[in-house]
Image (cartoon, grey):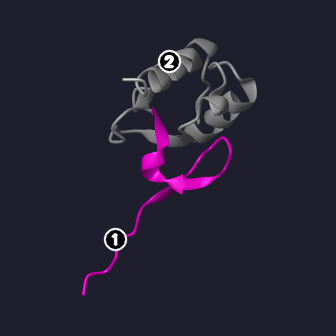
Amino acid sequence: MHRQRRIPTRTCVLCRERRNKGDLLRIVRTPEGQVVFDRNGRLDGRGAYVCDDTDHLGSGDNRANRGKLNHALEIDIDESTMRSLYEAMFSTQVE
């Protein structure tokens, strides 16, 4: 008899809702200090998960959500980095 495989879950750092890991997007602070979107979920560094929802990040300049990401990644994220994260995360979903 086979045991059912457990599906990993993670918590969105913005809304605090638990979801399947595959339904969330991962943002990483690399060891070099860059903040990037981790498309495959395998980059080294400190990661934070956010819901696959454009409302969470707004247009990339939402200060409250940037503060939550700052706290989760333990780094200050500037507005240009937030905009580039937003573009990287949501432009790839259309493809």
Residue, far right: 64
Determine whether, in the image, residue 67 is placed left or right of residue 23: right
At 58% from the left edge and 20% from the top edge, which residue is drawn? 82
Q: Secondary structure at mark 1?
A: loop
2 or 1: tag closer to the N-terminus? 1
Q: Residues within 10 Å of mark 2 (few under 14, many from 20)?
A: some
Measuring from the top left, give residue 11's x and y in whole percent. Answer: 58, 52
- Asked if the stretch drawn in magenta spans residue 5, the answer is yes
- In the rendered image, the residue lying farthest to the left is 1
**Magenta residue check for 75:** no
Is residue 34 in view? no
Quarter of the C terminus within the rendering: top left
- The label shown at residue 59 is none
77 vs 21: above or below: above
Q: Quadrant of residue 75?
A: top right
Q: Contact (CB < 8 A) between labels 2 and 1?
A: no
Q: Position of residue 62 (x, y in %)?
A: 71, 23
- Residue 3 vs residue 90: left or right? left
Amino acid type at image mark 2: Glu
Q: Secondary structure at mark 2?
A: helix
The range drawn in magenta is 1-28
Mark 2 and mark 1: Cα distance apart in space = 34 Å
| Residue labelled with disc 1 | 5
Question: Residue 46: x percent and y percent?
Answer: 46, 41
Q: Residues within 10 Å of mark 1 (few under 14, many from 20)?
A: few
Vertical side of 15 occupied by 91: above or below:
above
Label 2: which residue?
87
